[in-house]
């Protein structure tokens, strides 16, 4: 193992010992009590099975049969989740064939960030993760289940499902992916049309045609944003079947993997002798593996929020500093849009997860001695699934990349370090996705132009006010102020200005997520402006330095001058409309970005 990986892992174990031990006591105590449905009062049990068919009712009276909860984020508004419409019946049938039962335990909300971009609904994004976690807990609270299957893919959905599931970590729980849509037009072509539209050189009809050729069918969007980062991390964490993440929906192989996931989760139950609950899989080593994979692939910056929040749900205290220290030694092995021109289907074809995991294991950058849903040891994940005469089999994956413009070995990385940088200075702490930014653009020092929402920046661009070097400071976008929306509406405008030769950068306490593009952007800055963080004291014209090479985030103003400035009032109007008024209590409970922007942090830190 690489010494830095061991060092970070060991200190993470030491730091987390009190909360992790308490968590393990909690789940092991629950597991020792055995199947809950055998202890239910007769009336409770009758309620639980009243909607089942007669065969399933009879099966559930047998304590050696597995009852598997199905928790789904299905809706057909999300292309990624549309295939889940058909999964529950398929899962139930696969379970019946082996003498077990599946019950649809609960649905969780699933918002599409692509639809809500730049709209008021985007301000509910982080809150939706917390609601999903709570909805998952409610689904599993009936104490009927021996195991569970989680059906979710996109943005806040997988983190929310996993956070909720970890509080039932005494159960075997497996995540079931749906797969990416087939490739549409190239990502470069899509980005070019967006930028031409921002400049007024393309019509709305051209833009709509381009977007619909890109997002064109059921399945996950094919760029390497938060949704596909979720899938990659679930596999590296051993929570998917090997090679399951990026098989297209509505294919025979996808169906076979779903059937096998149904069977596999029953093998992990207490009655079947290979008991492996979720909470015994997601430990410090597995979380370090997830961070390594995030860095190696230039994954979504949203995971600087999600991974600490997931860790907290498992009693583990992961910090941005841990992530930064790992980034220094993990090479970037992938170029998938927005870090490159390829999409996730091209990544899969070039060698995919099997090649990536083998390279990282062989370089000592991943812990191999971890629990997974297919047994002990991550080496099994260097295999790929295939159909052989209609039967699902696994074979060793490729030992060489089939396209080194997309996926490279550790010996020839795109960069010697990871794709994410922790930024720190007198403006606070944030993160930057350096893998998507060309080296010549990673350092910008220029006068600040302050905005209180992304529409202000768009209006300034259209008025011709931004034809110069500047650092856009977009503040009052943090979790406690307005729920921390993504701010991609600004990306085309800043991209145009960069292409015109201006030095531009972005600093914000909001999010840019997995679609963060070619503009150097210090995001998730905390303390946020709403809480009096330094961003609130920046004024137009202040010289701001965004240094993605050194990881520094500075305003060239003395500490005395900065402290003497009056704090501006937070903008009004983001607490009403589009349901935002229902989440005021949650916004006030959200932790700083570095602690996951979670409403649960304080409660879980108290579990000592």
Image: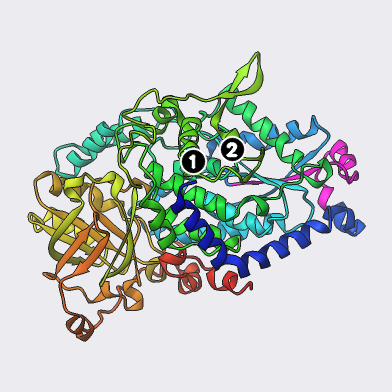
Image quarter of residue 32 = bottom right
Q: Secondary structure at mark 2?
A: helix
User: Where is residue 44 drawn, in percent x and y?
Assistant: 86, 58
Q: Secondary structure at mark 1?
A: helix
The CA span between labels 1 and 2 is 19 Å
131 relative position to 540: left or right: right
Within-10-Å neighbours for mark 2: few <14, some 14–19, many 20+? many
Q: Position of residue 428 (x, y in %)?
A: 30, 70
Identify the residue position indicated by label 1 in the image.
232
Magenta-colored stretch includes residue 568: no
Q: Is residue 443 left or right of residue 329?
A: left
In this view, 382 is above or below 500? above
Residue in front for this viewpoint, 545 or 571: 545
Residue at the image point whose x is 35% and y is 55% from the top: 486
Disc with the residue nearer the chain's start (1 vs 2): 2
Residue furthest out toward the top? 389
Q: Residue at x 13, y 49 (%)?
A: 497
Whether residue 67 is in magenta: the answer is yes
Tell me: 16 left or right of 323. right
Query: Quick check: can you spot residue 77?
Result: no
Q: Quadrant of the C terminus?
A: bottom right
Q: Are marks 1 and 2 in contact (CB under 8 Å)?
A: no
As rendered, which of 448 and 406 lies closer to the eye? 406
Residue 61 visible to the viewer: yes
Q: Please provide percent x and percent y for residue 247.
A: 52, 29
Q: Which residues are magenta?
A: 47-72
In percent of width and height, residue 71 lies at 65, 47
Q: Which residue is mark 2?
A: 84
Q: Please give the name of the residue rendered at 17% of the width and 79% of the height, measured from the top-left corner.
A: 558
Q: Is residue 507 above or below residue 393?
A: below
């Amino acid at each position: 193992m690489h010494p830095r990986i061991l060092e970070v892992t060991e200190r993470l174990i030491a730091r987390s010992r009190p909360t992790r031990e308490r968590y393990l006591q909690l789940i092991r105590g629950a597991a020792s009590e055995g199947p809950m449905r055998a202890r239910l009062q007769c009336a409770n049990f009758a309620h639980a099975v009243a909607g089942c068919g007669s065969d399933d009712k009879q099966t559930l009276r047998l304590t050696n049969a597995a009852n598997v909860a199905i928790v789904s984020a299905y809706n057909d508004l999300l292309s990624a989740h549309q295939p889940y419409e058909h999964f529950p019946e398929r899962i139930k049938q696969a379970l019946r064939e082996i003498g077990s039962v599946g019950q649809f335990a609960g649905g969780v909300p699933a918002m599409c960030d692509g639809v809500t971009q730049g709209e008021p609904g985007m301000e509910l994004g982080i809150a939706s993760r917390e609601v999903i976690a709570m909805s998952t807990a409610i689904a599993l609270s009936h104490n009927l289940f021996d195991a569970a299957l989680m059906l979710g893919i996109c943005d806040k959905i997988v983190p929310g499902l996993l956070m909720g599931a970890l509080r039932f970590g005494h159960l075997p729980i497996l995540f079931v992916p749906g797969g990416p849509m087939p490739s549409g037009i190239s990502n470069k072509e899509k980005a070019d049309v967006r930028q031409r539209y921002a400049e007024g050189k393309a019509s709305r009809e051209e833009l709509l045609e381009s977007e619909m050729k890109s997002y064109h069918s059921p399945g996950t969007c094919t760029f390497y944003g938060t949704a596909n980062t979720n899938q990659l991390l679930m596999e590296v964490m051993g929570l998917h079947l090997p090679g399951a993440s990026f098989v297209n929906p509505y294919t025979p192989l996808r169906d076979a993997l779903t059937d096998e996931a149904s069977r596999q989760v029953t093998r992990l139950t207490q009655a079947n002798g290979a008991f492996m609950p979720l909470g015994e899989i997601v430990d410090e080593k597995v979380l370090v593996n997830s961070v390594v994979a995030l860095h190696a692939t230039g994954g979504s910056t949203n995971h600087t929020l999600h991974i600490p929040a997931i860790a907290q749900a498992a009693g583990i205290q992961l910090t941005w500093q841990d992530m930064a220290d790992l980034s220094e030694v993990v090479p970037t092995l992938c170029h998938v849009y927005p870090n490159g021109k390829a999409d996730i289907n091209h990544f899969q074809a070039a060698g995919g997860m099997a090649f990536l995991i083998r390279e990282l294991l062989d370089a000592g950058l991943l812990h191999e001695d971890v629990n997974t849903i297919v047994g002990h040891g991550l080496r099994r994940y260097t295999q790929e699934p295939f159909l052989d005469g209609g039967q699902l089999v696994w074979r060793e994956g490729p030992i060489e990349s089939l396209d080194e413009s997309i996926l490279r070995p550790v010996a020839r990385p795109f960069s010697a370090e990871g794709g994410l940088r922790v930024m720190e200075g007198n403006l606070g702490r944030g993160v930057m996705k350096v893998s998507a930014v060309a080296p010549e653009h990673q350092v910008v020092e220029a006068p600040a132009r302050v905005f209180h929402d992304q529409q202000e920046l768009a209006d300034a661009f259209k008025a011709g006010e931004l034809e110069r070097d500047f650092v856009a400071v977009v503040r009052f976008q943090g979790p406690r102020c307005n729920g921390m929306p993504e701010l991609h509406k600004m990306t085309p405008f800043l991209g145009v200005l960069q292409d015109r030769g201006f030095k531009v950068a972005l600093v914000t306490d909001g999010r840019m997520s997995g679609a963060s593009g070619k503009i150097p952007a210090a995001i998730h800055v905390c303390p946020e402006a709403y809480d009096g963080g330094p961003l609130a004291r920046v004024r137009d014209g202040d010289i701001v330095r965004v240094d993605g090479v050194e990881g520094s985030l500075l305003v060239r103003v003395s500490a005395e001058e900065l402290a003497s400035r009056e704090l501006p009032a937070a903008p009004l109007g983001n607490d009403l409309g589009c349901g935002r008024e229902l989440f005021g209590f949650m916004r006030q409970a959200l932790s700083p970005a570095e602690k996951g922007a979670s409403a649960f942090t304080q409660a879980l830190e108290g579990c000592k």
